[in-house]
C-alpha cells in the first residue's frame, strides 16, 4: 500500500502542529498518522488514493455514514441565515424537545460542543447539587481529557490512581476514586468508607473505551440503588452509546435511569454537538447561573441544524435497528473466522459498536482482564493487515457501524479478515 503523500504531509504537519495531528488519539495510527481527502457513505479515501471501508467513522459519530445528503442539506440551508447569534434561536429549542422525546432521563438539556465539555459540566453540577466532592469513575473508561476525570489505575489491582497526562495537578486526584468496573464489592466498599463525600458515580453504561464490555447483569441497577441510598448522583456517559444503542441510548436499552447523562458523537452525525441532560432540579443550578457553563460555539446554527436532522431521522427511521443488525451480522462472520483459525478471539458488544481482541479464548469482564489477556501486538498486526486490504479499524479494538454499510461491504470486510488471519496463523 502506498502512503507516500501521507508520509510527506505528516512531515510537513509536524513543522506546524505538535505530533502533526489535532487530537492525541490520532497520534497512534500505524505506520504514522494518515491524512485523508474525502469520505462518502461507508468509505474513506486517504491522500494517496487508498480507499477503505471505514469502521472508525470519526470515532463513532458517523452513524449515517460519511457525507449523508440529508444532513449536509439541512446544515447548508440553515447556515444561509446566519451561523452564530450569541443569542437563542428556534433550532436549539427544537433539538432540546427532540432529545427530551427520545431520551428517558432528559427532563431538561444544555448543549455544548464536545463530549469532554458535557462531562465537565456534569461533574460540576453534580458537586454543586450534592455539596460533595468525590467523583467515582472506573478503570478503562474514558470521559474526555479534562483535569477532573483524566485518571486511571494501572489495572494491576495494586497501585494508586494516577493522572493520565503530565500537567494535571496531583492534588486533584484526591477528588476522584477510580474503581474496577463490574465489581459490586469495590463500589460497596467505597460507599462504606467515603459515602458521605461522594458527589457522583460516572460510568459508560457499556464500557466502550475498553473492549466494549457489557455491564454485568444487575450492575447498572446496583449503581442506581447505591447512589440513591447515599444521596449521590448517577451519571451515565452516553457519548458513545447515545443515539447508537437504540433511540434512547443505553438508559433505555437497560431500563436504568441516571440523574444526569452526557451525549455527543452520534447526535449530530459528525457535526460538533454535545449535551448534558437530566433532572430538572439538578440542572436548574445551571439555569439560575449558580453553576457556570458557557461556550461561544454552543448551539451554533450548523450543529443545531445537524442535530435536528439527525434526531428526527433517528426518531422516524430504523437507523438504530439497522446498526444492530449490521453489526451483529459482521460479528457472526468474524466468529466463524475465529472458529476456522482458532486464534481465541473475543468479540464483545451489542452490535452497533463492538470490540475484537485476541485473548486466547479468555473472557474479558473489566480493564484488568483486558490488560492481562488481550494481545495488543497481535491486534496491531491484524489492523495493519486489514488496512492493506482496504478496511480501516481503530487500533484499540473498537468497531463502529454505520447504516451506510452494505452487504457487499460486510462480505468484503470478512474476506479481508479471512486473508489477514490466514497470513497471521501461517
Ligand atoms: C464515553 C466518552 N465520553 C467522553 C468522550 C469525550 O468526547 P469528546 O472527544 O467529544 O470530547 C469520549 C470520546 O471518545 C467518550 O468515548
Image (tube, rainbow, N blue to C red):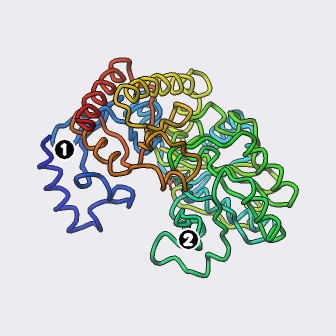
Image coords of residue 196 (percent x, y): 84, 70
In the image, 107: left or right of 203? right
Circle 2 — which element? Answer: loop
Residue in the image at 52% along x and 30% along y: 351
Q: Quadrant of the C terminus?
A: top left
- Residue lying furthest right in this view? 229
In the image, 388: left or right of 367? left
In the image, 400: left or right of 202? left
Say if 282 sits above or below 151 in the image.
above
The residue identified by callout 1 is 47
The residue identified by callout 2 is 147
**Could you tell which of marks 1 and 2 lies nearer the N-terminus?**
1
Residue in the image at 62% along x and 49% along y: 204
Residue in the image at 27% along x and 66% along y: 17
Residue 397 visible in the shown view: yes
Count neighbours of disc 2 (C-alpha within 10 A) and say few if under 14, some if 14 to 19, many if 20 or more: some
Image coords of residue 236 (percent x, y): 67, 49
Circle 1 — which element? Answer: loop
Closer-to-camera residue (216/315): 216
Image coords of residue 74 (percent x, y): 47, 33
Query: Disc 2, ligand 1: is the CB inside 8 Å?
Result: no
Q: In which quarter of the image is the N terminus?
A: top left
Amino acid at each position: 500500500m502506498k502512503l507516500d503523500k501521507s508520509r510527506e504531509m505528516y512531515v510537513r504537519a509536524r513543522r506546524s502542529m505538535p505530533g502533526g495531528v489535532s487530537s492525541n488519539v490520532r497520534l497512534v495510527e500505524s505506520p504514522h498518522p494518515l491524512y485523508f481527502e474525502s469520505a462518502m457513505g461507508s468509505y474513506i479515501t486517504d491522500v494517496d488514493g487508498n480507499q477503505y471501508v471505514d469502521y472508525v467513522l470519526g470515532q463513532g459519530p458517523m452513524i449515517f455514514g460519511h457525507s449523508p445528503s440529508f444532513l449536509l442539506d439541512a446544515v447548508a440551508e440553515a447556515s444561509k441565515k446566519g451561523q452564530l447569534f450569541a443569542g437563542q434561536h428556534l433550532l436549539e429549542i427544537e433539538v432540546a424537545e427532540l432529545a427530551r422525546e427520545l431520551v428517558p432521563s432528559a427532563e431538561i438539556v444544555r448543549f455544548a460542543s464536545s463530549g469532554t465539555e458535557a462531562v465537565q459540566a456534569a461533574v460540576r453540577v453534580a458537586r454543586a447539587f450534592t455539596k460533595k466532592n468525590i467523583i467515582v469513575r472506573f478503570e478503562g473508561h474514558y470521559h474526555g481529557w479534562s483535569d477532573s476525570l483524566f485518571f486511571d489505575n494501572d489495572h494491576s489491582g495494586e497501585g494508586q490512581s494516577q493522572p493520565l497526562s503530565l500537567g494535571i495537578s496531583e492534588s486533584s486526584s484526591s477528588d476522584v476514586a477510580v474503581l474496577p468496573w463490574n465489581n459490586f464489592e469495590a463500589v460497596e466498599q467505597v460507599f462504606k468508607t467515603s459515602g458521605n463525600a461522594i458527589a457522583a458515580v460516572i460510568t459508560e453504561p457499556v464500557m466502550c473505551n475498553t473492549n466494549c464490555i457489557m455491564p454485568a447483569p444487575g450492575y447498572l441497577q446496583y449503581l442506581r440503588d447505591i447512589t440513591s441510598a447515599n444521596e449521590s448522583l448517577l451519571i451515565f456517559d452516553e457519548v458513545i452509546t447515545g443515539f447508537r444503542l437504540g433511540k434512547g441510548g443505553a438508559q433505555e436499552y437497560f431500563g436504568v435511569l441516571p440523574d444526569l447523562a452526557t451525549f455527543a458523537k452520534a447526535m449530530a452525525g459528525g457535526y460538533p454537538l454535545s449535551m448534558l441532560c437530566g433532572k430538572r432540579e439538578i440542572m436548574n443550578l445551571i439555569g439560575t447561573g449558580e453553576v457556570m457553563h458557557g461556550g461561544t460555539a454552543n448551539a451554533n446554527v450548523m450543529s443545531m441544524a445537524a442535530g435536528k436532522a439527525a434526531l428526527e431521522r433517528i426518531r422516524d427511521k430504523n437507523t438504530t435497528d439497522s446498526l444492530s443488525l449490521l453489526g451483529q451480522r459482521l460479528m457472526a462472520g468474524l466468529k466463524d473466522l475465529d472458529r476456522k483459525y482458532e486464534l481465541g478471539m473475543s468479540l464483545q458488544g451489542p452490535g452497533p459498536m463492538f470490540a475484537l481482541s485476541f485473548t486466547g479464548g479468555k473472557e474479558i469482564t473489566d480493564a484488568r482482564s483486558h490488560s492481562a489477556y488481550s494481545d495488543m501486538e497481535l491486534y496491531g498486526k491484524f489492523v495493519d493487515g486489514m488496512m492493506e486490504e482496504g478496511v480501516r479499524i481503530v487500533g484499540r479494538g473498537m468497531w463502529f457501524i454505520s447504516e451506510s454499510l452494505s452487504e457487499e461491504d460486510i462480505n468484503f470486510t470478512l474476506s479481508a479478515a479471512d486473508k489477514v488471519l490466514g497470513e497471521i496463523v501461517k
